[in-house]
Amino acid sequence: MKAAETQESKFGPPTVDRFERHPLDWRVLADGEPPARDWALEHWLGMGHVTILAALGGLGKTLLAQMIGSALALGRPFIDSVPRTRNVLMWGAEDDHDELWRRECDIARFLGVGLEAFAKSFVLESFSDRDCTLMDLDLSGRLCWTPMLDELREQVADYGAEVVILDNSARLFGGKESDRNQVTRFVAELNGNVRGAAVLLVAHAGRAVGSEYSGSTAWENASRSRMFLSDRPPDAKIFDATEEAPGERRYLSRRKANYASRDLRAFHFENGVLVPETDAAASGLVGALLDRRYESIVLDGLRKLSTELGQQPTDASNSPAFLPRLICQFSLGEGGTQRDLSQAMRRLMVDGRLRREVVGRYGNRNPRFGLVAAQSECTR
């Protein structure tokens, strides 16, 4: 019996330290207020967890990640407000030293500073010709960490990094991206090795139609938020062969957000950078400016549909003539989603700038209702 016990002890599962329990103490917490949620980039990049930035190849996701890192290092608003300057560490696994240098020159010009402005707060290193795998499979197929995970942890400590940008998951994760357990463990290890920093993990989108990230849904579930960069508005999944090919515009969607609502930003390429098509972040009026923009799109769309395209839009969401649906169908939305335009249409109706009126009769003499703009809007 003792021999069996000895053998079991020798070859059985390894012993672990006794688990320490730390439940929330409601009596202590009852007299206080929880701290405000900490953001590196307001509503887009939160401290203490992994955010995924995904896109198909060649759309500029590395450029966007580098621009985000540069803005955070200077404390400059970019697509939204930046509460304060952050120390940023970025690993670039696809672009070589000189390409990252060239890109940063363009970003610096866009931000109106010299490269020396980033010296203390933005550490950018190329791994294009070196292995940077953080977790890999051992000979038995089990996922294990590599010395590069130790190196990442040491760099975070040495540089005092508060934001860690990792480009990209294909070079950093050596496991099976379709294995839920392995993906979840990888994201957990990232969180556990960066001392509460915000992690922006750049990833490729899948090639299947409509796919916004590659691999298991665990990538979506394990991360707290996910951004998706595309060359089409988010609602445009299938395109007519005669439709104009994608140009220089890009759309950044906040597709998953545990701690904020979904949102959208549009950019255009100019002088080597992605220029946001609103500078609302600088004034903190992002929501208000976007609301006004979508309202203008709805009013312009109604005018074009009714006077130029022979359509009679309605506010009935189950109708084929639903105004936001027609605006998107006729490519008049300028990047706004049907949800954005629906909300704008309802605000306009509440304000009296859009009205539901009888616009004709059906064959059975019943009144036909449609949307019309207030007289004040027609004379603008």
Image (tube, rainbow, N blue to C red):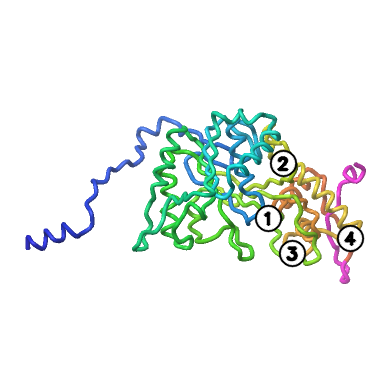
Report the magenta residues as a range: 362-380
Q: Is residue 52 visible?
A: no
Q: Residue at x 50, y 61 (%)?
A: 216
Which residue matches tag 4? 309
Which residue matches tag 1? 234
Image x and y of residue 280, in percent: 71, 36
Q: Residue at x 36, y 40 (%)?
A: 24
Q: Earlier in the sequence, mark 2 or mark 3?
A: 3
Q: Earlier in the sequence, mark 4 or mark 1?
A: 1
- Answer few, some or many: residues within 10 Å of disc 3's Cα (few below 14, many 20 plus, some between 14 and 19): few
Amino acid found under the numbered disc labelled 3: Phe
- Answer few, some or many: residues within 10 Å of disc 1's Cα (few below 14, many 20 plus, some between 14 and 19): some
Q: Is residue 373 magenta?
A: yes
- Mark 4 or 1: in front is 1
Give the alpha-carbon distance from disc 3 to disc 4, as whole Å.
Answer: 20 Å
Disc 3 is placed on an element classified as loop
Give the alpha-carbon distance from disc 2 to disc 3, as whole Å.
Answer: 25 Å
